[in-house]
Amino acid sequence: MQKKLIFKKQLIDPDTGEYITAIAFIPEARDKGFAKVYELMSRKLFEDLANRVITGGEAKLLLWFLAKTVELPIQSDMWIPIDYRKVAEEVKLSPRVVHMYVKQLVRKGYLEQFKDRHSTFRLKPDLVYKGYLVRLKESEIDF
């Protein structure tokens, strides 16, 4: 059974005045009242990359996290344990520089650190979400 498009329209975010594209679908019968969202990336993430708010090594590391997030299983909590040396090899930076960029991305609000694990991070859920919409708490995301 295919999903039917209910509407697609531009809405205005009352807090920021920005336009938001809203798309609504009638879910398949087997979904029973919830919508599936497998990968959802905010416009802010792309705009910040395009407008060079994030550049160089920070952008490279952010894209590394994005690629790792996409590889995770659908119902993952999106936490990624990292080994700074291995990440440094993959992104062609030194481990010290990777550590510095991770701290900067946390400080700037792109990454969050797992409370009990110093080397486990994820992209903030308001930037990237992968999973079922029913698991997404309103307090965690602001699209």
Image (spheres, grey):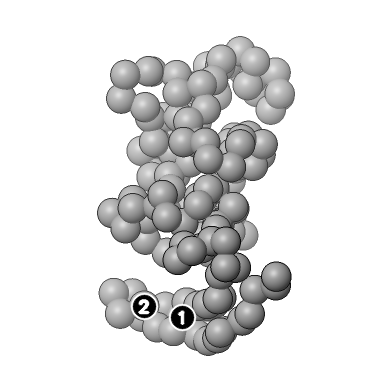
Q: Position of residue 75 (x, y in %)?
A: 53, 40
Horizontal side of 131 relative to 94 (left or right) equals left
Q: Residues within 10 Å of mark 2 (few under 14, many from 20)?
A: few
The quadrant where residue 3 appears: bottom right
Q: Amino acid at mark 1?
A: Tyr
Vertical comparison of 89 with 91: above or below = above
Residue plotted at (45% across, 66% down): 33
Which quadrant would the C terminus be assigned to in this image?
bottom left
SS for dot 2: loop
Query: Is residue 80 in sight in this rendering?
Result: yes
Vertical comparison of 140 with 5: above or below = above
SS for dot 1: strand
Q: Position of residue 76 (x, y in %)?
A: 52, 36
Query: Is residue 58 in sight in this rendering?
Result: no
Q: Residues within 10 Å of mark 1 (few under 14, many from 20)?
A: few
Residue plotted at (70% across, 72% down): 2
Checking the image for residue 41, the label placed there is: none
Horizontal side of 19 relative to 16 (left or right) equals right
Residue plotted at (57% across, 68% down): 29
Q: Camera-side residue: 29 or 140? A: 29
Q: Position of residue 38 (x, y in %)?
A: 59, 52
Real-space Cα distance between discs 1 and 2? 6 Å
Which residue carries the number 1 mark?
19
Q: Position of residue 96 (x, y in %)?
A: 53, 16
Which residue carries the number 2 mark?
13
Q: Camera-side residue: 30 or 49? A: 30
The reply to whether dot 1 and dot 2 touch (C-beta < 8 Å) is yes
Q: Earlier in the sequence, mark 1 or mark 2?
A: 2
Residue plotted at (46% across, 56% down): 133
Q: Amino acid at mark 2?
A: Asp
